[in-house]
Image: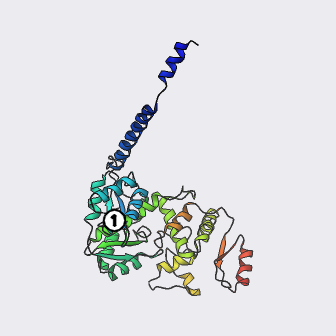
């Protein structure tokens, strides 16, 4: 290599100033990208106008609300949403309530919805396993709707938009199983139809998030099975096993023999059956009639719905409550084993 070449290479070596300029350029670009992210208020999906029930509970702060919005697919970026709240000085002004939000809404629209909440709220809770009769009483007790209005809506509410309700019969049992058990916040004097929509939309949310349905049942029969599990199970860990018992019985053309189905049909409310009650004539009496009951017998929660979708793989055909330790059900594969359990646990 000649002296001239060495001299040229030495002159071409970048100096500290060049490095500073390059670093500065990177900083500027990064800042621009970061600023773009912070100011991104576009909707998640401008073409998806499906509404999602979004609930803000009393006492929830802006960070908690933002995390829930992201989790439910209503905003793209938590940092940008929090920045928008802070920039507009509204972080502490979001109001508790129930909202119908959509992925097609931009940040400004969502924030305006949450700022212009429903005002004074009525809170009502529907526990898992409540029947329509129980829900009617709960809503009447909260002064949200009269029982005659409730039962009229049960018979007439338009459910054509809910695919999972295909096959449900008409009549007073029509919405049994689909008014999802949860805690709700509504404005005083909310229209009864809006309350029904809120509860059905909540069911739809849970239904869409359920695991792959492996039971082989239709959507409606899956909810029926889940309602039986809800009415029989005491602990979450036994729900899938109880579901397997009924499916195993179904495969063998055995009677379901679910006590809760008899209780559901009786005009008086009972918690236990007498011996004579097993002969109570009703299409819901699964000791007398083959197969699942004609409709759900309660409104199941998420755990029972999951159990009905993915029941355990067992050979169990019988179960009874462990009266000795009161810690769950005892399962049996054969009738002889079941009789032994009856003797062992004092039946």
The quarter in which the C terminus is drawn is bottom right
Q: Horizontal placement of 1 versus 38: left or right?
A: right
Question: Viewer-proximal residue, 110 or 309?
Answer: 110
Q: Residue 312 location, x and y as percent?
A: 63, 63
Please name the residue shown 73% across and 84% down the image.
343
Which quadrant holds the N terminus?
A: top right
Residue drawn at point x = 49 percent, y = 65 percent: 223
Question: In the drawing, does residue 210 fall left or right of residue 160?
Answer: right
Residue at position x 74%, y 79% from top?
340
In the displayed structure, would residue 279 be above or below residue 199? below
Q: How is the image coloured?
A: rainbow
| Mark 1, residue position | 197
**Which residue shows up at 29% across the image and 59% down it?**
111
Q: Front-most of 127 and 273?
A: 127
Residue neighbourhood size for the residue with mark 1, other residues' Cα within 10 Å, grouped as few (<14), some (14–19), many (≥20): some
How far from the left and from the top, in percent, is residue 162? 38, 58
The number of discs equals 1
Q: Which of the two residues, 67 or 170, is positioned nearer the viewer here?
A: 67
In terms of secondary structure, where does tag 1 sit? helix
Q: Is residue 347 left or right of residue 60?
A: right
Q: Is residue 255 visible?
A: no
State the image coordinates of residue 306 (x, y, percent, origin top left).
54, 63
Q: Is residue 137 visible?
A: yes
Residue 56 picture location, percent across and down: 36, 67
């Amino acid at each position: 290599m000649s002296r001239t070449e060495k001299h040229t290479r030495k002159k071409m070596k970048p100096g500290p100033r060049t490095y500073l300029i390059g670093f500065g350029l990177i900083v500027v670009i990064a800042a621009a990208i970061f600023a773009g992210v912070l100011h991104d208020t576009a909707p998640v999906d401008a073409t998806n106008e499906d509404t999602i029930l979004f609930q803000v509970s009393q006492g929830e702060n802006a960070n908690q609300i933002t995390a829930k919005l992201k989790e439910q697919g209503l905003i793209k970026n938590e940092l940008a949403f929090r920045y928008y709240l802070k920039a507009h000085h509204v972080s502490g002004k979001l109001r508790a309530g129930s909202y119908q939000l959509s992925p097609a809404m931009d940040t400004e629209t969502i924030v305006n919805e949450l700022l212009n909440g429903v005002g004074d709220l009525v809170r009502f809770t529907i526990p898992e396993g409540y029947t329509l009769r129980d829900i009617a009483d709960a809503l009447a007790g909260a002064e949200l709707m009269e029982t005659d209005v409730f039962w009229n809506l049960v018979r007439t509410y338009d459910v054509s938009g809910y695919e999972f309700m295909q096959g449900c019969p008409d009549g007073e049992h029509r919405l049994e199983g689909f008014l999802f058990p949860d805690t709700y916040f509504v404005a005083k004097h909310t229209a009864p139809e809006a309350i029904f929509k809120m509860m059905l939309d909540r069911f739809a949310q849970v239904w869409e998030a359920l695991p792959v349905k492996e039971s082989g049942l239709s959507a409606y029969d899956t909810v029926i099975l889940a309602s039986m599990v809800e009415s029989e199970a005491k602990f979450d860990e036994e729900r899938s096993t109880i579901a397997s018992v009924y499916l195993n019985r179904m495969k063998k053309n055995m009677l379901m023999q679910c006590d809760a189905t008899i209780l559901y049909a009786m005009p008086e409310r009972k918690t236990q059956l007498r011996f004579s009650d097993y002969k109570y004539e009703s299409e819901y009496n699964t000791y007398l009639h083959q197969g699942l009951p004609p409709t759900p017998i309660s409104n199941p929660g998420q755990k029972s719905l999951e159990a009905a979708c993915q029941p355990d793989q067992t050979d169990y055909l019988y179960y009874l409550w462990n009266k000795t330790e009161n810690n769950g059900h005892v399962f049996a594969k054969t009738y002889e084993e079941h009789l032994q359990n009856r003797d062992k646990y004092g039946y």
